[in-house]
Image (cartoon, rainbow, N blue to C red):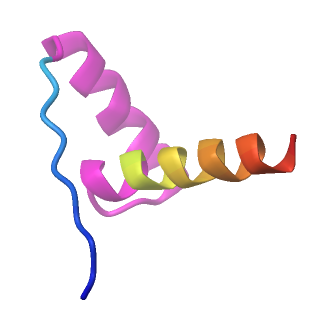
Amino acid sequence: MKETASVVMRVDKNFLERIDQKCKRDGFLTRTEYILYLIRNDVAENRAV
């Protein structure tokens, strides 16, 4: 069975606009895809330390 989790965040509109700009710049299709990419990289960096 696959374990899943939900995360709910309250963020301001400026934060979402910055995320959208970075998504487009880096070639991601969705905001969620970009955020998951950032999380994966952070986890990988923490494991390497």
Residue 16 magenta-drawn? Answer: yes
Q: Nearer the viewer, residue 23 or 43?
A: 43
Q: Nearer the viewer, residue 39 or 2?
A: 2
Query: Residue 2: where, in percent of width, then height?
Result: 27, 82
Q: Quadrant of residue 9?
A: top left
**Vertical placement of 36 versus 8: above or below?**
below
Query: Residue 12: where, in percent of width, then height?
Result: 16, 11
Task: For the C terminus, give its image quadrant.
Answer: top right
Q: Residue furthest front?
A: 1
Q: Residue at x 31, y 63 (%)?
A: 29
Q: Main secondary structure of the magenta part?
A: helix
Q: Quadrant of residue 46?
A: top right
Q: Residue furthest bottom?
A: 1
Q: Residue at x 12, y 34 (%)?
A: 8
Query: Residue 47: where, in percent of width, then height?
Result: 76, 49
Q: Residue furthest right?
A: 49
Q: Which contiguous range is marked in magenta?
A: 11-34
Q: Residue at x 24, y 12 (%)?
A: 14
